[in-house]
Amino acid sequence: MAYARMTDQSKPMGELNTTPLIDVMLVLLVMFIITIPVATHEVSVDLPGDETNFRLPPPDLLKNKVVIDSNDRLFWNAEPITQAQMAVLLAQTRLLPVEPELQFEPSANAGYETSARTLKTIKQSGVTKFGFVGNHKYRELK
């Protein structure tokens, strides 16, 4: 601990001992790091099973629409599909000479987990022409 003897009683000591302040800050930093919860996000993936009649709807050459209804069912251009089938369809659209636009429209009552899983699949596919549609239905005019 730094301590200076005062030779002249009229002058106050001009140095501040910062060691205790640094110690308190380090303890607080360690406590905050320890108390931060570990973020574990888990997304289940529907792997294709042993389906012999695995029929996919053909992708459109201009635009394809992915819809999630209020019962968390997934549709590709109005035909029901699974998450695994959507991944295959997205890969097929990426192989086309001109990549078609992909439109995503979840219903107002679609589940968050299904929407997040669908968006993750879309992002992992590498689609570059992507857009949300149908948002105007939920806009409030004031």
Image (cartoon, rainbow, N blue to C red):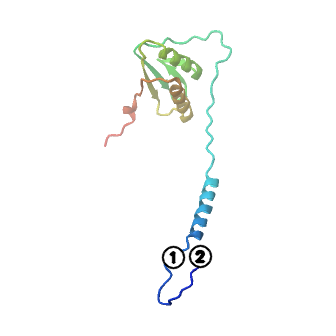
- Figure quadrant of residue 63: top left
Disc nearer the start of the sequence (2/1):
2
As shown in the figure, which amino acid type bears the numbered disc 2? Ala
Q: Residue at x 51, y 26 (%)?
A: 122
Residue projecting furthest to the bottom: 9
Q: Residue at x 54, y 18 (%)?
A: 80
Q: Residue at x 49, y 14 (%)?
A: 95
Which residue is identified by label 1?
15
Residue projecting furthest to the right: 50
As shown in the figure, which amino acid type bears the numbered disc 1? Glu
Q: In front: 129, or 86?
A: 129
Q: Residue at x 39, y 15 (%)?
A: 62
Residue projecting furthest to the left: 142
Residue 9 placement (x, y as % from top left): 50, 90
Q: Residues within 10 Å of mark 1 (few under 14, many from 20)?
A: few
Residue 74 placement (x, y as % from top left): 53, 23
User: Distance from label 2 to label 1 (Cα)?
Assistant: 9 Å
Position above or below: 74 against 139: above
Residue projecting furthest to the front: 7
Residue 85 placement (x, y as % from top left): 57, 18
Which residue is identified by label 2?
2
Position above or below: 17 against 118: below
Q: Secondary structure at mark 2?
A: loop
Q: Judge left or right: residue 50 versus residue 135.
A: right
Position above or below: 54 against 71: above
Residue 130 placement (x, y as % from top left): 43, 25
Q: For the residues labelled 2 and 1, say whether their Cβ atoms are less than 8 Å apart.
A: yes
Q: Judge left or right: residue 135 versus residue 56.
A: left
Q: Secondary structure at mark 1?
A: loop
